[in-house]
Image (cartoon, rainbow, N blue to C red):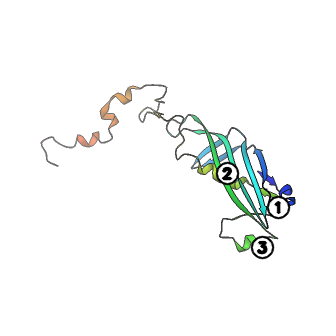
Amino acid sequence: MILDITRGIQNKGIEVHLCLEEKWEKDQWRGDTLTYISPVAFEGSYLITEDTVVVRGRAKVSIEASCARCLESARLDVAADIEEAYIRDRNGELNQQRSDDEQYTYSGHCIDLTDAVRSALLLELPSRILCKEDCRGLCPVCGVNLNTTTCSCQKDPARRNPFSALAELLNEDEEV
């Protein structure tokens, strides 16, 4: 996502509206593959003061990933507010001085917003992506999707309890 700041350079100190859109393909997040099914849209503004460009706005996208419980496809709309300062990097001097900082830099008349937008969107994702809140998941015995099929495995309470084998080791008369 490249932002051309030429208009803002000509009008320093004046907030300039921006609207960007870019198609992203796939991303990795917590071991899962995310597919961006809509273009990433960013709408906001930027302001240039001296050697700093402050970018503010909101990013939106629709993603598709596997449900954490049933592994079916799940669609999720994600939005994130972004406010970042980009500092002008003159001939690579800033990168050497601030190698430990997580400061965004730019040179020339273009700023790459991709990292800031990507980070903000990924931070807005829930810890577990679900196809629906009440997803029942997969049967631990036979593996069928419990949202669409009922199985006889779940009706046997002894099989459902992982500690049922331990109960057989105890006599009812014995004290524990």
From the image, tell me which residue sits under label 2. 118
**Mark 2 and mark 3: Cα distance apart in space:** 26 Å
From the image, tell me which residue sits under label 3. 93
Q: Quadrant of residue 126?
A: top right
- x and y percent of residue 110 in the render? 82, 57
Relative to 81, 55 lies left or right: right
Residue drawn where x is 82% and y is 61% of the image = 12
Q: Amino acid at mark 2?
A: Arg
Q: Residues within 10 Å of mark 3 (few under 14, many from 20)?
A: few
From the image, tell me which residue sits under label 1. 12
Tag 1 or tag 2, which sits nearer the N-term? 1
Task: From this view, report whether residue 101 is shown above or below residue 176.
Answer: below
Please tell me whether mark 3 or mark 1 is closer to you in this view: 1
Q: Quadrant of residue 7?
A: bottom right
Q: Residues within 10 Å of mark 1 (few under 14, many from 20)?
A: some
**Mark 2 and mark 1: Cα distance apart in space:** 27 Å
Query: Is residue 24 visible in this depiction of the protein?
Result: no
